[in-house]
Amino acid sequence: MGQTGVINQVEQIVETVLAELARRRGTAKIQPVFLDGEGDQADPLVEASQVAVPNPARLDALIAMKETTPARLGVWRAGPRYRTITLLKFRADHATAVDAVFRPVSEKFLADLGLFTVQTEVKNKDEYLTRPDLGRRLPPEAMETIKARCKPNPQVQIIVVDGLSSTAVEANVRDVLPAMTQGLTAMGVTVGTPFFIRYGRVGVQDQVGMALSAEVMVSLIGERPGLATAESMSAYLIYRPTKDTIESDRMVVSNIHRGGTPPVEAGAHLATIVKKILDAKTSGVKLRL
């Protein structure tokens, strides 16, 4: 096939994809944005998710693409630069992500959920970001508090960890925790005393699990925020962690947030996974769901 033939074939594929996207568009809520003479939106409050490309060749296909992804498609330009609204939206999303990392989880939020708090060996947020190893270890005083306040030998021990997004914790735990706890209780599974760990990393669940002799450890932890959302949370699960635990022993359910897996649905799903882990007495790559 010659170069012309290849180009024609690619064009046909593109046209087929665009046609399919247009067909799937359905009742779109995204609408074109009219630009002013300088190439910026007249109304800065208009969501940047709307189509801003003037006179696109396939408006229907572009709208369909934007409806399937939070990516910044069709932001257009003002000369060689981004439009003002695009830059402002980018800076606002970046600021939200930074706040998610540096803002602590609210004490009121923790009190409302009845979660007591312990802290890893990390002293502050700067050290947390530069010393991941310290975020996996709890000091002796924290371990004493955990052993004094938690039920020993639980089938399931749930911990809430701030991780890299306090925003994710506050946006999701309020729904995930009760949904998971209720689901496990309905299955006849005993749940330990949930609590909160400040400046924690995923691996801190191993130390807690060994200290309490928990069969299954579940960590609800804030994910690294991005420009699409700062509310995404993950749940890490492991069966009987030890000092020899490796990462392939863990399981993870990620993208828990209102734009991904809804919190209540995630809680119910996690309860089901925990039950399968208990039945199989293993987790990670060794468990076949």
Image: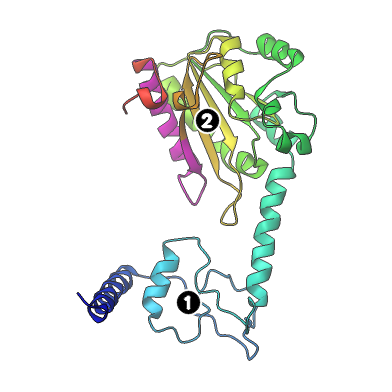
Q: Residue 189 placed where, x, y %?
A: 43, 16
Query: Observer-nearest residue: 87 or 5?
Result: 5
Pinpoint residue 182: horizontal percent, then vertical percent: 47, 26
- The magenta segment is 253-279
Amino acid on which the number 2 mark rests in the picture = Pro
The x, y position of residue 31, in whole percent, is 47, 76
* Extreme residue toward the front, this view: 2
Q: Which mark is residue 31?
A: 1
Instruction: Name the residue type under label 1.
Output: Gln
In this image, 35 relative to 125: left or right?
left
Counting every numbered tag in the picture gives: 2
On the image, the x and y values in percent for residue 150 come to 63, 13
| Badge 1 element | loop
| Residue at 51% in and 16% down | 241
Between 263 and 277, the one lying in front of the other is 277
Task: Give the Cα distance between marks 2 and 1.
Answer: 39 Å
Does the segment drawn in magenta span residue 79? Answer: no
**Residue 178: assigned label:** 2
Residue at coordinates 69% horizontally, 9% vertically from top-left?
A: 148
Question: In the image shown, does 55 or 186 lie closer to the viewer?
Answer: 55
Relative to 72, residue 195 above or below? above
Relative vertical location of residue 169 with respect to residue 25 in this rendering, above or below: above
In this picture, is 272 found above or below 189? below
Is 264 part of what is drawn in magenta? yes
- The reply to whether residue 252 is visible in this rendering is yes
Q: Nearer the viewer, mark 2 or mark 1?
A: 1
**Relative to 185, is 171 on the left or the right?**
right
Q: Which SS class for mark 2?
A: helix
